[in-house]
């Protein structure tokens, strides 16, 4: 990317804008609970990314702005960028980020990267995306990308949160995907959603790790158990969740992949703090 490309997208006058970063405008903010919210920003014309990747973002509010990794939740064909964020009390970035309003400026570094991408998995029949909390964000991008349905016959996305209201973002995204003029047709009959809660009564109760081990997940989805021969897995959530679910998929014979060595599963830690 050339400096000229960056300069054409960068705002001129903010004294706290780091060199070479994009200055983008907030276009929409939606709060779900006192812990979770979603926001959209303008997209720099020169930004290219693969669905599932993350970028570094922050606020131009100090000489050394705090930047954090955020998965891009929108698909690569979207004109804007969407993010799904936690609100951490006294979190160095999210304490301020949760107060953003339409028109505010967001700093974004120009490079997108990450391992939760179709390229890091070898060909398979079924794709399973397991998430907790804001770990759903990269999957919000992947399930809206037609390429995901070219690569996999069936896509199963799970989202586990403490409470019902925390599931609204994933429920809305899946609903909108199935009704989307661009991707709805290829997703219908191929995209399957499994929400669960751990601290408030909903249709499916429990951690996804427990529901996989007990078989309740397979029963609810009416599917055969995970099998490394046919299935590929993406995992995104808290450290503890990732540790536990890795133990399960490792024991089943899945092998961790990367961009340079694609295999049968990939992981990424969800943004916290
Ligand atoms: P729990 O309520 O039993 O802790 P958080 O909001 O803390 O990031 O958690 C999001 C969801 O992830 C919660 O439903 C939480 O369940 C679940 N969770 C936390 N730790 C694990 C884990 N080690 N394995 C599976 N799920 C987990």
Image (cartoon, rainbow, N blue to C red):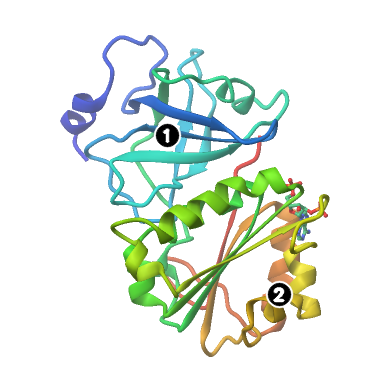
- Residue 243 is situated, as x and y percent measured from the top left of the image, at 73, 62
Alpha carbon distance from label 2 to label 1: 32 Å
Q: Dot 2, crowdedness within 10 Å: few (<14), some or many (≥20)?
A: many
The correct choice, above or below, for 46 with respect to 130 in the image is: above
Provide residue 232's location: percent of width, then percent of height.
Answer: 52, 77
Q: Is residue 240 above or below residue 204?
A: above
- 85 or 63, which lies in front? 85
Position of 28 relative to 262 (above/below): above
Q: Say which residue appears at 77% left-offset and 62% top-offset.
A: 207
Q: Is mark 2 within 8 Å of ligand 1?
A: no
Q: Earlier in the sequence, mark 2 or mark 1?
A: 1
In the rendered view of the protein, which quadrant contains the C terminus?
top right
Q: Which mark is residue 89?
A: none
Q: Which residue is mark 2?
A: 217
Secondary structure of the residue carrying tag 2 is: helix
Extreme residue toward the bottom, this view:
229
Categorize mark 1 by other alpha carbons within 10 Å: few (<14), some (14-19), many (20+): many
In the rendered image, which residue does mark 1 sit on? Answer: 40
Residue shown at 68%/43% (left/top)?
165
The yes-or-no answer for disc 1 within 8 Å of ligand 1 is no
SS of the residue under disc 1: strand
197 horizontally vs 27: left or right: right
Say left or right for 167 vs 137.
Answer: right
């Amino acid at each position: 990317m050339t400096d000229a490309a960056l300069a054409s997208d960068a705002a001129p006058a903010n004294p706290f804008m780091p060199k070479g970063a994009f200055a983008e405008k907030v276009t929409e903010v939606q709060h779900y609970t006192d812990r979770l919210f979603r926001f959209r920003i303008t997209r720099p014309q020169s930004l290219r990314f693969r669905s599932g990747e993350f970028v570094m973002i922050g606020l131009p509010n100090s000489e050394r702005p705090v930047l954090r990794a955020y998965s891009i939740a929108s698909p690569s064909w979207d004109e804007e960028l969407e993010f799904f964020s936690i609100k951490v009390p006294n979190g160095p970035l999210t304490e301020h980020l949760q107060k953003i309003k339409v028109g505010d400026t967001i700093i974004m570094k120009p490079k997108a990267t990450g391992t939760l991408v179709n390229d890091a998995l070898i060909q398979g029949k079924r794709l399973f995306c397991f998430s907790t909390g804001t770990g759903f964000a990269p999957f919000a991008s992947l399930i809206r990308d037609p390429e995901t349905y070219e690569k996999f016959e069936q896509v199963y996305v799970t989202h586990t949160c403490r409470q019902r209201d925390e599931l609204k973002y994933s429920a809305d995204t899946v609903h909108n995907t199935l009704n989307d003029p661009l991707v709805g047709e290829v997703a219908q009959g191929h995209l399957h959603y499994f929400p669960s809660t751990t601290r408030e009564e909903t249709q499916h109760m429990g951690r996804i790790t427990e529901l996989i081990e007990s078989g309740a997940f397979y029963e609810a989805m009416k599917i055969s158990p995970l099998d490394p021969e046919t299935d590929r897995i993406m995992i995104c959530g808290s450290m503890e969740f990732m540790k536990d679910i890795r133990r399960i998929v490792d024991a089943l014979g899945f092998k961790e992949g990367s961009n340079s060595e694609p295999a049968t599963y990939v992981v990424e830690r969800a943004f916290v703090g």
